[in-house]
Amino acid sequence: MLVGAAALLLGGGGLAVVATTALAGNSQPEAGSGHQHMVNAAYTISCPDVGERLRTVPHSAQLPVSKGLSSLDRQVHDAYHKMMGGSGSNVLSGLKAQRQKTINMMVTAIAKNAKRPSYLLKMSGCTMKPITEGAGTGGNDSTKSVKDGWYQGQTQTQTGQTQDQTQGQDPNQNGSQQPSQDPNQNGGQQQGQQGGPSPDDFVDITTVQPNADAPPFAAPKGGNATTGTFTTECGRNEDGHFNSDNVIVTPGVSNGAHHTHDYVGNKATDAFSDDNKLAASDTTCNNGDQSTHYWPVLRKLDGAAEQKPGAAQDANVGTTLTPATVTLKFRGSQAGQVTAMPRFLRIITGDAKAFTNGTKNANASWSCTGFEDRQLKDKYPLCPQGSQVVRTFAFQNCWDGQNIDSGNHRDHVAFSDQNGNCPNGFKAIPQLTQRITYDVPQGDSFAVDSFPEQLHKPVTDHGDFINVMPDDLMSKAVDCINNGQECT
């Protein structure tokens, strides 16, 4: 049994120092030899999430801000290596100085054409604190019902583990918190399936009680509901469009996601795609829809290691699984008619860092074919023989009526309440659901790509969408939905 220390990079927000144990008596997995799980006991360098606090980012500041967020990631990564080398408490003070410089650069860039976000300057300090199993979910039941506010309760107070980001232990105490392993032991682990998933991340779907009898997993209903649908068929990424960019969050920065994305629709999407490039692109959709749809790949944990960014170089190991089916469907509202989405509207649903950020923005949904009235948010499903794994992303269905994006990429859209009512000032728009199915090996032998520090937890699953529908096609979709028709 091999014990090692793995550095897990927290993008813009922290770094998990994870002691990992290889199970089944194997010190290193070989490609094709089966799968491996890691058990984590962990400490983390916890830093305030600068990206989440961004509000107004003028176009002129977009690239400096993207580069700044990427630099914050790298600084925390480097701080870990110094700490494992025995630098102790000096690491946090050095990290704070680096973050101050980077955040000040971002603030200065924003202030040239917008109000100076001075509050960001208070986010440079980091602390060291433990990560407990399931910290990202706050102990919530993994089978919590839609009606309990999981999908449509996005305005709830964030869970405690993110509220105390700046209330960790005294940084001077962190020397006693370091894992006791020889830092040289981690070399053999760096390209492995670091820290996850664990067997506890899986549950037999047949043991889960039905919990999804309301939208978005059931059609809108009621006297005012708009019951039509519009489905766009864009294939299963047969063309092999993959990259580890994130054009919404870190435009202009390669490998901004630190995990691999699976794309359908717009063929030009990468970190450097602006609206003009997207509008001029070919598409895999059969109705001329040029929209961009992407999500993290799902991998078979067979030990295969592709040495490139977003894959083994970012602790994402295993063979990429091609979806069996991809369904992209727009639905109406329980409260009444929907209005057209603006072209180039950007929406992120879920939180790629929910394991460390908490579940405020989490929106993962896992199930099995034949059991989709049972949805899991922080567990992977173990499906019966012949049943496929299902990932469903139900996107925000309210828009502020003005902006196609926002500084933190969330504030311009929202979820309706259980009755379909949008927050004040927001309009109902068609609700996109991305439904992806997979044929996976039997057992707990698959995992979603993630930021390294997120330990491949299912709660971190997320979907991304840029609406590039031509206006006439969007009008058709809205008419179909509002008139109760089923259209493609």
Image (tube, helix red, strand yellow):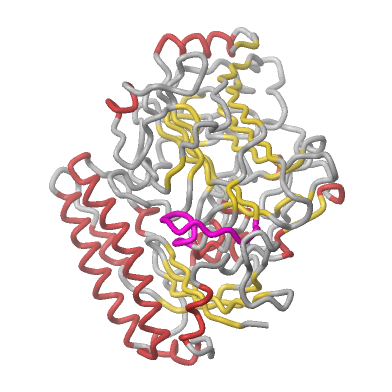
Which of 429/329 is in front? Answer: 329
Residue 232, x across and y down, in percent = 56, 20
Q: Can residue 482 be seen at all in this image of the molecule?
A: yes
Magenta stretch, main secondary structure class: loop
Which residues make up the magenta segment? 301-314
Q: Residue at x 47, y 40 (%)?
A: 348
Q: Is residue 313 magenta?
A: yes
Q: Can residue 349 be seen at all in this image of the molecule?
A: no
* Image quarter of the C terminus: top right
Q: Residue 149 sits in which quadrant? A: top right
Q: Is residue 421 magenta?
A: no
Query: Is residue 373 found left or right of 76 in the rendered image?
Result: right
Q: Residue at x 65, y 57 (%)?
A: 301
Q: Residue 174 sits in which quadrant? A: bottom left
Which of 463/35 is in front? Answer: 35
Q: Residue at x 55, y 31 (%)?
A: 238
* Image quarter of the N terminus: bottom right
Q: Is residue 313 above or below residue 390?
A: below
Which of 475/32 is in front? Answer: 32
Query: Is residue 429 found left or right of 368 in the rendered image?
Result: left
Residue 265, x across and y down, in percent = 47, 27
Q: Residue 229 sits in which quadrant? A: top right
Query: Is residue 229 found left or right of 307 in the rendered image?
Result: right
Query: Is residue 427 found left or right of 229 in the rendered image?
Result: left
Residue 431, x across and y down, in percent = 56, 27
Q: Residue at x 19, y 52 (%)?
A: 116
